[in-house]
Image (cartoon, grey):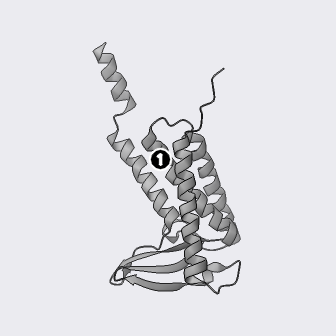
Amino acid sequence: MAATPKMPMLGVAVAAISLVVDQLSKYIIVEKVMRPEGVMGTPYLTEKVIEVLPIFNLRLSWNAGISFSMFNSGTAATTFILLAVQVAVSLTLIWWLRSLDKRWLQVACGLIIGGAIGNIIDRVMFGAVADFLDFYWGTWHFPTFNGADTFISIGAGMWLLDAVLAPSHDAASSSQDSKD
């Protein structure tokens, strides 16, 4: 009978830290800095902007969709479907984390899990995700995002770098075979 792999604590720690940082930053921005006056349950009706730098604003907005506001209809059905997909992906990543032996990939997976759970919490509590980081140049604005989106993007980037730069398992095993 095969032993069940243990959960890599590095990935779990990174997920927990990124989740706490995300939720704490959202709390500070939403509750302390912006103080929205929107009706509870529909927080995405309120938007506020604080100019910080010539290329950066704190802009509170609520995204009922996914990245770049795709599927941002705000309907209950869309919210439920997006929530179900986010939970399924998060559970799959948590299950997959157990099989990772590379610390680099454990960190990447932990960042994605922590960010995803942070956005799940927003979607459950508010029906939308709090976004507040707004970078722009002139009249062009990059889509507003949050800490969770940053963690997910960094984790995905690390994952892609590993896929591109790491020697493939087939190449490693075939070079080992040729040495024998």
Which residue: 52% across, 71% down? 69
Examine the rendered structure and indicate whether residue 74 appears above or below residue 154: below
Q: Nearer the viewer, residue 144 or 104?
A: 104
Which residue: 52% across, 50% down? 14
Which residue: 35% across, 38% down? 166
- For the C terminus, the image quarter is top left
Residue 114: x percent and y percent?
56, 55
The residue lying furthest to the top in this view is 180
Q: Which residue carries the number 1 mark?
A: 107
Residue 57: x percent and y percent?
43, 80
The residue lying furthest to the left in this view is 179
Which residue: 71% across, 77% down? 41
Give residue 117's quadrant in the image. Answer: bottom right
Q: Amino acid at mark 1?
A: Val
Residue 124: x percent and y percent?
68, 65
Residue 5: x percent and y percent?
59, 31
